[in-house]
Image (spheres, rainbow, N blue to C red):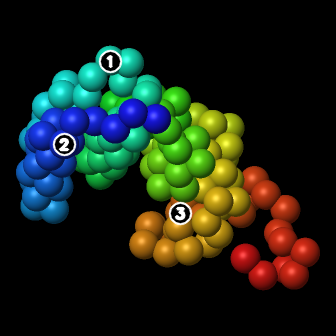
Amino acid sequence: MTELPADLHEQIKRRCADGDGLADRGLHEQAIATYNEAWKLVPEPQTEWEASTWVLAAIGDAAFLGGFYSSGVEALQFALHCPGGAMNPFVQLRLGQCELERDNIDKAAEHLARAYMLEGKEIFSRERPKYFDFLKTRLKPPASGQW
């Protein structure tokens, strides 16, 4: 895979860092706008670059935290088609959470289960308990009986 030119990579990272600062302050709408600026810098075809995965994950995260679940689903579904996106437990977690908030129960279960299979219960440790509780209603318990 070809790497982005160093100066472009730095510009994207800088915009994402600015977006992270906004998200950390709870300014999710502004964070999304800033992440979108970074997204616009990623060259076509955008699905070819690792940067796409983390930019879209950041957009999806800010969208989820800001309550913009449809926007979160859109960004995170696209991230699944970028390098490492489908096997990224965080992308799967946030996509499942957005889908659950939109009452898309089957899709929520699918993505939350993938997050669980990729990283285990730990992926849910910083999340509201409702997401793991929901997942437990959709999966058989492990053979040990211990979640």
Amino acid identity at mark 3: Lys
Q: Position of residue 115 (x, y in %)?
A: 60, 56
Q: Position of residue 83 (x, y in %)?
A: 49, 38
Q: Which residue is mark 2?
A: 6
105 displayed left or right of 75: right
- Label 3 vs 1, first from the N-terminus: 1
The structure residue drawn at horizontal position 48% and vertical position 48%, both measured from the top left corner, is 91
Q: Quadrant of residue 74?
A: top left
Res 63 label: none
Which quadrant of the rendered structure holds the C terminus?
bottom right
Residue 5 visible in the shown view = yes
Q: Position of residue 95 (x, y in %)?
A: 49, 43
Camera-side residue of 54 and 48: 48
Camera-side residue of 99 and 20: 20
Q: Secondary structure at mark 3?
A: helix
2 displayed left or right of 110: left
Q: Which residue is mark 1?
A: 44
The structure residue drawn at horizontal position 66% and vertical position 46%, both measured from the top left corner, is 109
Q: How many marks?
A: 3
Q: Which residue is mark 3?
A: 130
- Label 2 vs 3, first from the N-terminus: 2
Give me the C-alpha separation between circle 2 and circle 1.
17 Å
Mark 2: give few (<14), some (14-19) or many (20+) Cα within 10 Å. Answer: few
22 displayed left or right of 86: left
Q: Nearer the viewer, mark 2 or mark 3?
A: 2
Give me the C-alpha separation between circle 2 and circle 3.
42 Å
Amino acid identity at mark 2: Ala
